[in-house]
Image (cartoon, rainbow, N blue to C red):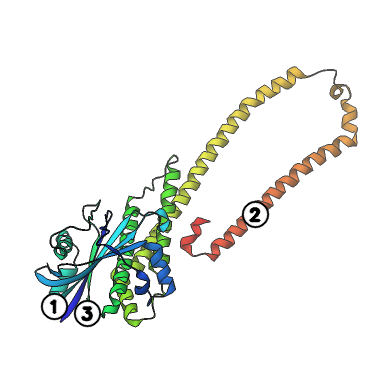
Amino acid sequence: MANFLHVMICYQDYKPNLQRDAIFDTSSSLNLMTAPFQIAFDSVFGEVRVRKSQQREVKISSLNGTVERIFIFASDKARLNGTERDDLIVYFRILIDGIDAETVDLLTTNSPVALTERQSVIEQAFGGEVPLHLSSYSRYPGHQAWISEVSPDEYTGTIACISAFYFYGWILALRIERNQLRQDITPQIRAGDKIVAQIIEQRMRLLNLDRYFLVGDRTTNSYLKEICTKLSERFRLGKRHRKMSERHAAFESHIDNTSTALQAQRTASLTNMVFVFTCLSVPFAAMQVLFGMSLDSSIYLKTAEMISNTKTYVVALAAFAVVGVLVLLLMLVARIHAHIVQKLRNLLPFSDRSSY
């Protein structure tokens, strides 16, 4: 029984051969997909190129097969809110006869040996030539493979697009996980802006993974819908996103609490500084009053009249009343604000409450 081995490899450098690498029009291939999926696909990939194989016979893991064409899906830095770099997803499928259960594990495993074999298929397909000029900045590029039954020819381009799409979602999920491992959460006053910027960028990545790669409305075609579900579950995009989101929410809560603690430290330091300056200013103010007093002032000559005059008390009460009203207004505003914030926190899930 014949099967298709679908292979995807991620690279970061590509020099297309304009004479051989033709632009692939994805519009016809995505006709069977829903509008939300098409929007997501166009938001992720900017260009797709394809090259037909001149030498179709290839060998992988001691098995013979044939390669018809190789697709190159390009995503640049201008996409995904500028959080990613220039990426190339290379996709090809190999028609192989006689794949048993043991061979399935061998062909779909991820290892340096498997990567070498998969990359060798590209060279074999073009007679030893390396026409794609592909390279990777990492030692081992991300790569995956999955097996399916032989599908109708009209689904070839669509399955290529679906495979590259969900595979790239897996690549982005891996990057988020690794960035979370490298995330510095040490409380540092001077490094606060840098940490906040990293947290914001990670949140954008999680949102992009959710809105593009976890879109539920993908296709009404039952055959293609099954492939979408299979690849999404294979790469565990939903589970990865939930786990990473929970971890990121903990990071945000930690940063929020840290910022509050650091702000309290700064406020305490400022309060102490103001207290010291106030203590130092009192003697100077007293000296200024004493040395600037005039014994001929009416406050000394007509003290009894001032004390017995009701206007003195009216003016004093009015001054205290103005100050008291302002203080009460500030307290009322603070209480209303605290009440509103508490209401909002009660309306949100527990993991999202720290952002308020």
161 to the left or right of 306:
left
Vertical relation: 229 (above or below) 24: below
Of the residues under marks 2 and 3, which one precedes in the sequence? 3
Q: Which mark is residue 97?
A: 1
343 to the left or right of 288:
left
Tell me where residue 151 appears, x and y as whole percent. Answer: 25, 79
Vertical relation: 85 (above or below) 302: below
Tell me where residue 349 appears, x and y as whole percent. Answer: 49, 65
Alpha carbon distance from label 3 to label 1: 10 Å
Q: Residue 187 carries which label?
A: none
The amino acid type of the residue labelled 1 equals Asp
Name the element at disc 2. helix
Of the residues under marks 3 and 1, which one precedes in the sequence? 1
Circle count = 3
Q: Which residue position holds label 3?
A: 150
The amino acid type of the residue labelled 3 equals Val
Of the residues under marks 2 and 1, which one precedes in the sequence? 1
Q: Which residue is at the front of the view, 89 or 169?
A: 89
Q: Which residue position holds label 2?
A: 335
Q: In which quarter of the image is residue 96?
A: bottom left
Tell me where residue 5 appears, x and y as whole percent. Answer: 20, 72
Name the element at disc 1. strand
Name the element at disc 3. loop
Q: Residue at x 44, y 50 (%)?
A: 255
Q: Quadrant of residue 44?
A: bottom left
